[in-house]
Image (tube, rainbow, N blue to C red):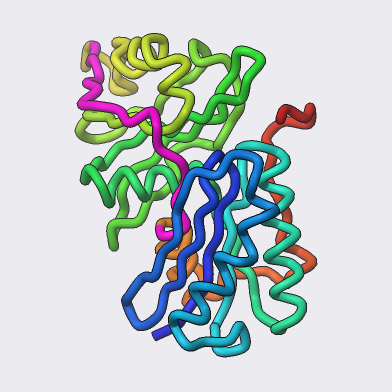
Amino acid sequence: MKSILAIDTSGDACSVALYRDGEYMVSHRLAPRRHAEILLPEIKMLLSQAGLFLRDLDGLAFGRGPGAFTGIRIATGVIQGLAFGADLPVVPVSSLQALAQGAWREHKARHILTALDARMGEVYWGAYRMDIGDLAVSAVEECVCAPREITLPELHGDYWFGVGSGWATYGEVLSETVERRYEHDQPGSGFTRRELVGFEPNRYPHARDVATLAIVALERGAFAAPEDAQPVYLRNRVTR
């Protein structure tokens, strides 16, 4: 069984998780603008509690974004530095995908619309379905746009769950977007209205979910060298 250290600082939470032999050790707390201060001490604490050194791990993972530019840069820099020092592979994981994985873990949601407040009247968003092995799989390309411009895919069983800070800011619009009627691709099949079964607006990407997704990717050989582990912003213009 492989072991991996995962982090995510793409939002207000500073999140660290250590996965080993099917068990998780986690440090997850809200720490706006303090990621650079507390991230490395939290990593050292978890490794110490587990009695491990970085070189004992099989890989590292981080939330690559989208999200807060500063937080994403911090996570990228820390992981690259640790990976270079310990000669470990890196698995970049979408922060939106990690949110969806968390929605499954907490709510058993199978179709998830993740939305993070991107400011300037826009959201970073992605649509996910749960696949074999209970892993969140992207159903559309991740995007940044105005909430009303979101177009959801047609999936079997149109019950959706929303998660992320975008739901706190644009909950009404996103709810209308989910439940908007759509015409089936099959001619003559009529229209269907999706159903929103709930949403969790005050949730941030969790390193436990980053680790869950990353350990599978690591076992499949889907990892990067430290220098190739890059952030994904979805937008070129910086917002803090």
Residue at 59% across / 59% down in the picture? 62
Residue at 71% across / 83% down in the picture? 87
52 or 163, which is in the foreground?
Answer: 52
Q: How many marks?
A: 0
26 relative to 198 in the view: left or right: right
> Based on the displayed image, in which of its 4 quarters is residue 129 positioned?
top left
The residue stretch that appears in magenta: 191-208
Q: Where's residue 119, x and y in %?
A: 63, 20
Q: Where's residue 54, x and y in %?
A: 61, 83
The relative height of residue 3 versus residue 215 in the rendered view (above or below) is below
172 relative to 63 in the view: left or right: left
Q: Where's residue 154, x and y in %?
A: 33, 28
The relative height of residue 38 versus residue 141 in the rendered view (above or below) is below
92 relative to 74 in the view: left or right: left
Does residue 96 show up magenta in the picture? no
Residue at 45% across / 14% down in the picture? 170
49 relative to 236 in the view: left or right: left
158 or 64, which is in the foreground?
Answer: 64
The relative height of residue 171 versus residue 220 in the rendered view (above or below) is above
Q: Where's residue 164, x and y in %?
A: 43, 32
Quadrant for the C terminus in the image: top right
